[in-house]
Image (cartoon, coloured by chain):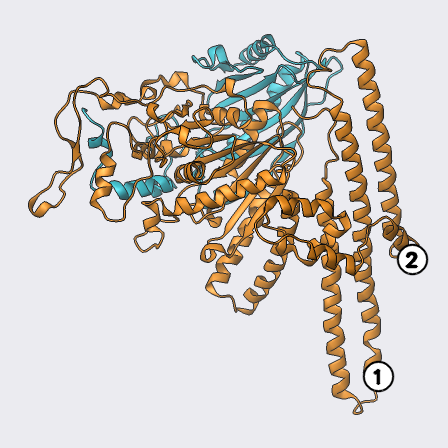
């Protein structure tokens, strides 16, 4: 459960982001003023001596008004930093209070405990009074507007940054790919310096591993606002290139996705959920885009889940539905704070058209492998940002995304506490023990009649491998993680409305509300392993048969394949019984209206 | 059936794999299917608007019914949720929190009392081996599930929290692309909940 005494609702990093936005506005206004002044100078030059109208005097009131707008924005930014400092002090105080509340200590109330709780509440009240005082001071400052006295006050309190200090701070920004060094550098800055750097160079911060997610979010939103303004201007002019058109569509999709998460209500508090734009690269992959958006606060959540989607996922197909279901069910499961990161961070195979260049990606591991490396790096970034306060982190790969996540755990040191593979067509590892999450923390959710899950290699047959061998360039995704020999935990993931035989509908229902699949995913995501309902593994029905089964493709004249692979001999074993879940009574499953 | 290869594979196995992994069986987009069997059916005469109205009503009626047991609703809201990954089917849900008076954690007996209260007004406990008599039991919480017609109610109770969470699940309904866009972007909508009574 959450700490007894909560932080202030808006994190200081968010307030720093607001301050940066105000500074950005000031800079933009000043740039516009420069343009106006330049235009006027040209006009004066052009008409000087030919007209008696005093052109040079006209723009001054305009310039003065514009300058006052810029000054006001800078002034308000300083005031916001003052408040952010107060919130930071408040949160630090709350942390000290919570550190005095030991787990379970106040559950059973004795006299001594009641006294301790009273003392802690008194301390919280004192912190709240200080924060209220700061808020009142900010209100007065903003009401008065820019004035020498308050400017001096803000400068004295470190709420504004001299240019030379800003340059020094930027000079110390680490180069290279070292999330830990980046985190240390950022933490060494004052809040005012942070805001100033974010306003000046948001593109240096938005996708930088090691920085707090809230900082990345604020920086990415600043960059996105600039991109949107620029592309919409080109759209209005009719000068958008095809790629820019896709990028503009990506940005609009990102905005929709952010709004969908920000207008979602938390099931326990009833408050709107937080959303963070964690990765923003709308131009990546030739305009397909690379985006990651979180529901919840990645910097503070007790549990973080990273959703890795599969084939057909692009920024354009990105939706909030699955992550909101995972978020809600995880909140239901524990009451702990949760953040769910929708990670569209790789170039997933995006279509099935024969003319689609991604076609080969569907039937090979190449795109999954590229994505796996990126996934592992992004998860490492999440970890680095919370080195002192690690979340319980679960990576959830669905369909082709499970292959991607499996490769990340097998080949790129994915730093996850738990790995969930749903609807998996296979993982290119022989044993869960070869993954960073090991046997104990690798989980497979495979509905017994989900066709896609039949595509993984098993220990006893490889008919799809035979097919793959017939077609150059075709490669399977790997081993079935639901099989006993793979050694992962298999959890119940049947659907009440499942098909009678292999089908594709069962591939798309792992994340529906009130299903055993989602209940189990939520239990794992929140680390409540005792609440996971485990399923029996798929197994080798021929294990006790004294025969080697080989598969071959029947061929006609000239060696042309004429049918599906068949075993090299007839054997009277019901291979459908390989999966005990196939025969589980639907009445044993969670209800789904 | 002696081996699954004959079922699973055909010469088109690879293309079938692609279609399945993409979750893009195009004929499903606009064709309603039976929620239980998955078979094509006539379009349900239940519209999302109707499901919304009935789900909200069920939430409010249940909240009122539970007031006598000491539960006070603190907020309620409507949310659309996906049923299938590719967003072909959606459902509406009516959600909210009910605080316990006095503010204590729950027990299994409390879960049974809620189930019985809902059963007394026409809901049926969903009885299955993993949810015997309508109660799915976890290490520190319980989820009560009852059903009536095409609606279901989940109530989650916690040993260490003085509130319960309740949601009414509407049926999964096929959505057109325009409806998907609408559901995807629709903000969760709060609705008024019954005020506390003097006794509560």
Q: Where is residue A122, by image quadrant?
A: top right
Tell whether A84 sits left or right of A539: right
For residue A557, above or below residue A267: below
**Disc 1 sits on a residue from what chain?**
A
Residue furthest to the left in view is: A557
For residue A189, above or below residue B99: below
**Disc 2 sits on a residue from what chain?**
A
| Residue A54: image tag | 1
- Residue at the disc numbered 2: A148
Query: Where is residue A358 drawn, in percent x and y?
Result: 36, 52
Q: Who's cyan, chain-wise?
A: B
Query: Where is residue B196 drawn, in percent x and y?
Result: 72, 19
**Label located before the other in sequence (2 or 1):** 1
- Tag 1 secondary structure: loop
Tell me which residue sits at (21%, 31%) in the image: B5
| Residue A586: image tag | none
For residue A435, above or below residue A169: above
Quarter in which the C terminus of chain B is drawn: top right
- Tag 2 secondary structure: helix
Q: Residues within 10 Å of mark 1 (few under 14, many from 20)?
A: few
Residue A22: tell me if it is visible.
Answer: yes
Residue A511: tell me if it is visible.
Answer: no
Tell me which residue sits at (66%, 57%) in the image: A201
């Amino acid at each position: 459960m959450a700490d007894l005494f909560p932080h202030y609702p808006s994190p200081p990093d968010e307030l720093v982001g607001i301050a940066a936005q105000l500074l950005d506005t000031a800079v933009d206004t000043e740039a516009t003023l420069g343009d106006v002044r330049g235009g006027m100078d040209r006009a004066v030059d052009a008409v000087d001596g030919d007209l008696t109208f005093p052109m040079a005097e006209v723009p001054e009131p305009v310039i003065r008004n514009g300058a006052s707008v810029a000054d006001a924005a800078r002034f308000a930014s300083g005031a916001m930093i003052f408040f952010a400092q107060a919130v930071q002090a408040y949160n630090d105080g709350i942390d000290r209070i919570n550190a005095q509340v030991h787990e379970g200590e106040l559950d059973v109330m004795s006299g001594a405990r009641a006294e301790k709780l009273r003392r802690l509440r008194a301390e919280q009240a004192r912190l709240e009074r200080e924060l209220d005082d700061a808020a009142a001071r900010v209100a007065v400052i903003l009401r008065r507007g820019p004035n020498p006295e308050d400017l001096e006050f803000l400068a004295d309190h470190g709420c504004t940054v001299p240019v030379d200090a800003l340059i020094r701070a930027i000079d110390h920004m680490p180069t290279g790919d070292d999330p830990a060094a980046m985190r240390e550098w950022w933490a060494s800055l004052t809040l005012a310096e942070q805001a100033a750097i974010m306003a000046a160079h948001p593109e240096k911060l938005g996708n930088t591993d090691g920085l707090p997610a809230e900082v990345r979010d604020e920086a990415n939103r600043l960059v996105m606002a600039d991109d949107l303004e620029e592309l919409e201007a080109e759209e209005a002019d009719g000068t958008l290139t095809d790629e820019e058109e896709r990028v503009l569509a990506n940005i609009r999709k990102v905005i929709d996705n952010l709004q969908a998460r920000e207008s979602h209500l938390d099931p326990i508090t009833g408050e709107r959920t937080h959303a963070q734009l964690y990765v923003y690269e709308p131009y990546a992959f030739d305009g397909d885009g690379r985006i990651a958006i979180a529901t919840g606060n990645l910097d503070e959540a007790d549990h973080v889940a990273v959703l890795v989607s599969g084939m057909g996922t692009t920024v354009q197909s990105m939706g909030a539905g699955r992550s909101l279901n995972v978020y809600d069910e995880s909140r239901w499961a524990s009451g702990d704070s949760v953040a769910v990161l929708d990670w569209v961070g790789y170039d997933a195979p995006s279509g099935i058209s024969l003319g689609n260049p991604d076609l080969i990606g569907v039937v090979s591991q190449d795109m999954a492998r590229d994505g796996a490396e990126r996934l592992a790096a992004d998860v490492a970034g999440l970890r680095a940002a919370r080195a002192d306060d690690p979340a319980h982190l679960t990576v959830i790969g669905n369909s082709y995304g499970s292959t991607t996540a499996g490769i990340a755990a097998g080949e790129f040191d994915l730093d996850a506490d738990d790995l969930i593979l749903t609807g998996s067509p296979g993982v290119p590892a022989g044993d869960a023990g070869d993954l960073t999450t090991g046997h104990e923390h690798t989980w497979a959710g495979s509905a017994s009649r989900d066709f896609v899950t039949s595509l993984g290699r098993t220990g006893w047959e490889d008919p799809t491998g035979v097919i793959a061998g017939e077609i150059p360039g075709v490669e399977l995704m790997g081993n079935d993680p639901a099989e006993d020999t793979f050694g992962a935990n298999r959890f119940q993931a049947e659907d009440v409305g499942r098909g009678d035989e292999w089908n594709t509908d069962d591939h798309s229902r792992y994340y529906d509300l009130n299903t055993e699949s989602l209940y189990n995913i939520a239990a794992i995501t929140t680390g409540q392993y005792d609440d996971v309902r485990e399923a029996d593994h798929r197994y080798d029905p021929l294990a006790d048969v004294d025969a080697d089964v080989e598969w071959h493709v029947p061929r006609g004249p000239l060696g042309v394949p004429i049918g599906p692979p068949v075993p090299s001999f007839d054997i009277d074993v019901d291979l459908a019984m390989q999966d005990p879940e196939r025969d589980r009574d639907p009445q044993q499953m969670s209800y789904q209206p | 059936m002696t081996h699954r290869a004959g079922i699973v594979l055909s010469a088109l196995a690879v293309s079938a794999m692609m279609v399945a992994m993409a979750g893009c069986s195009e004929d499903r987009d606009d064709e309603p299917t039976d929620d239980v069997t998955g078979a094509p059916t006539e379009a349900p005469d239940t519209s999302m608007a109707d499901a919304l109205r009935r789900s909200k009503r069920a939430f409010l009626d249940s909240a009122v019914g539970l007031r006598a047991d000491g539960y006070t609703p603190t907020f309620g809201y409507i949310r659309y949720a996906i049923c299938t990954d590719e967003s072909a089917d959606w459902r509406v849900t009516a959600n909210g929190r009910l605080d316990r008076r006095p503010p204590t954690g729950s027990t299994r007996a409390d879960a049974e009392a809620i189930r019985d209260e809902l059963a007394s007004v026409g809901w049926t406990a969903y009885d299955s081996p993993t949810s015997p008599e309508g109660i799915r039991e976890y290490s520190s919480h319980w989820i009560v599930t009852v059903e009536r017609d095409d609606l279901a109610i989940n109530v989650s109770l916690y040993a260490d929290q003085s509130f319960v969470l309740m949601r009414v699940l509407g049926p999964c309904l096929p959505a057109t692309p325009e409806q998907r866009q609408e559901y995807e972007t629709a903000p969760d909508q709060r609705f008024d909940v019954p005020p506390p009574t003097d006794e509560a």
